[in-house]
Image (cartoon, rainbow, N blue to C red):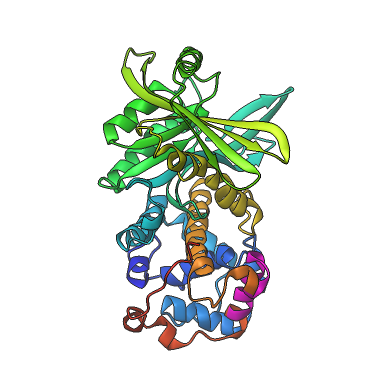
Amino acid sequence: MGPWLGQLVDTRDQDSITYPRQFLFWTASMTFLLKLGSRRKLRFELDSPVALANLNRLSQSAMASRAHSDTVEHFLSHVPTGSLEKLLQRMVHRVIRMKVLDYGRLHGHLLLVLDATGQLHFRQRHCEHCLERTVKGQTHYYHHVLEAKLVTPDGLAISIASEFIENTDPKAAKQDCELKAFRRLAETIKRQYPQLRLCLCMDALYAKGSVFTICEQNHWKYFITFKPGSMPALWTEYHSLLALMAANCKVVHVDQHTRHEFAWVNGMEHIDDRKRHHRLNIFQCAEHDEKDPKERLFVWLTNFPVRVDTVDELGNKGARCRWKIENEGFNIQKNGGFNLAHAYSTKRRQMHNWYILLQIAHLILQFLERGNLLCQDVKRSFGSIRAMAQRLWESIRNVLIPLEALDIAAAACIQIRLNSS
């Protein structure tokens, strides 16, 4: 990672600075790697001589003192957001080339879940780029971001691209929105991963002709949640045809209490608002639990062919993985110590950079938590994932990292495997 950090763009006057970019990058990253929850805690939680020595070893520098959190903030104001995004892209490319995520492929495609989440919320206008919404006479100002995360059925959720949803054009008649951000994000993903076989998993908001067209042009597969209000005419037609295709069904007994009843219709035709023709397949899963009399019904649009031998895998190892971005992604980042909704900065560039740093730290910690460097899983070793962050903080503060642990040549001989059970 050292050579990559050396290529970070830093517009500070290099002849006048005290702290190099690598040192400040690791200092800032510790906010999330140690799950400190705020910039202020950097002053107090890394105040030991050993912590300073460890930061020097990680960054291959020789600083005599720690950097103040305001210095870190100043550094991030001189790093273009795209530079940190490039670093994250290099890390993800490395993971993909090493085939680390191949076990989670569905019919050769990596699952990429797209969804938006709230980043910051204000009672007063924060900046000219704020989105705004009025509820019961009260206007709220907020910043959202559209995330694209590679997910696996066992719960990995790795950010590969982010698109900030914000008002950047003062002449625009309408606010920026998730669908506009999707078009920009799709271009970024195709540019950065042109050959990657992807299957996009999206919620009902994306059940639109423009989304189908983008997926078709980029040769992407997709699963999109289908609801009655999304495309009413298609919904009615689907249920009419479903009643005539009794053979298109399959029952799967998940365990002694739960069963899934699948049904599907292939070759549905849809003409969107721009008169573009699309051919879709629709399938559903009715989940029955003997302990819960209420039936749960899930319906999806897809361009995968649905057959009796594939429908179970498409549903349970594909379409239903959309929730991984909520549970293993946003929920962990908001409530698992990363404190995503905290205002690490209120300035636009720094705000974006803190967000990308959070995604980088989350990637690193997921591989630490699931890798075979630990003798047993995290909960057995530490009691919880949050407790592991506490132990990691104690180690950085009190235990000097051995030099051999940072030897790139020696590390090349070590193979770290994921526990994908």
Q: How many marks?
A: 0
Closer to the camera, 253 or 65? 253
Look at the image and tell me whether residue 46 can be seen. no
Q: Looking at the image, which residue is at 58% across and 78% down?
A: 396
Snapshot quadrant of residue 107:
top left
Closer to the camera, 336 or 77? 336
Where is residue 76? Give x, y as percent.
Answer: 48, 58
Which region is colored magenta? 381-395
Where is residue 148? Give x, y as percent.
Answer: 44, 44
Q: Looking at the image, which residue is at 33% across and 30% down?
A: 214
Snapshot quadrant of residue 52:
bottom right
Residue 394 belongs to the span the image colors magenta: yes
Where is residue 126? Give x, y as percent.
Answer: 61, 39
Where is residue 7? Give x, y as percent.
Answer: 32, 64
Indicate left or right for 375 with 280 as reference: right
Q: Looking at the image, which residue is at 44% across and 20% down?
A: 245
Q: Looking at the image, which residue is at 62% across and 42% down?
A: 258
**235 to 216, vertically: above or below:** above
Look at the image and tell me whether residue 250 can be seen. yes
Snapshot quadrant of residue 94:
bottom left
